[in-house]
Amino acid sequence: MQQRSHTLTFNHLSFPSRDVAATAGFFVRHLEWQATPMGRSCVLKGHGFDVVIDDAADRPVHWPGNFHIGFEVASLDDLQSLFERFKAAEVEFVTGLITHGRGSRFFCRIPGGVLVELNTREDAAEPFRAGFGRA
């Protein structure tokens, strides 16, 4: 294994939205982030990293193939609870609850068009239970 000369931590992700307020609102309402407007864009703070929603109201946004962002919850109960809350809020689902060797998950499309995966590894097969940097 190669010796590392420095440590990296995840800082943020940034993506465009044609409706910054609606996209940011999803993160605030459903995922408990804090939103701070930044001009016509928005910075979301929560869960150890930032999400920057860049204003793209003046141009089309095209997402490649299966591009998505993924969030992990601790348990299957947490995942099922989110799924039910999203259903009650009429979130646009791309899948139902899926269970396979890598654990349970579901995919939804949030305002602004981004595909989001919510998953848990609690019920994953042993080789997939640990995430990057976790035992």
Image (cartoon, grey):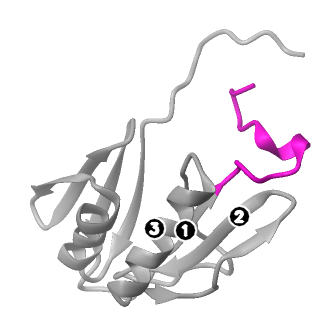
Left/right of residue 107 with respect to residue 22 in the rendered view:
right
Task: Using the rendered view, name the quadrant where residue 49 is placed.
Answer: top left
Secondary structure beneath label 3: helix
Q: Which of marks 2 and 1 is nearer the N terminus?
A: 1
Pointer 3 and pointer 1: residues touching (CB < 8 Å)?
yes
Instruction: Tell which of 71 and 53 is nearer to you.
Output: 71
Q: In this view, does 127 lie above or below 20?
A: above
Which callout, 2 or 3, points at the residue further toward the start of the chain? 3
Q: In this rendering, is residue 75 above or below 28?
A: above
Q: Residues within 10 Å of mark 2 (few under 14, many from 20)?
A: many
Query: Where is 127 relative to 111, above or below?
Result: above
Residue depicted at 55% across the width and 62% down the height: 79
Front-most of residues 44 and 85:
85
The residue range painted magenta reads 120-135
Q: What's the residue type where badge 1 is placed?
A: Gln
Under mark 2, the amino acid is Ser
Residue in view at x 24 percent, y 62 percent: 28
Q: State the mark number for residue 80.
A: 1
**Label 3, on which residue?**
82
Which image quarter holds the N terminus?
top right
Name the residue tied to disc 2. Answer: 104
Q: Residue furthest front?
A: 77
Q: Is the magenta stretch mostly helix, strand or loop?
A: loop
Viewer can see residue 70 = no
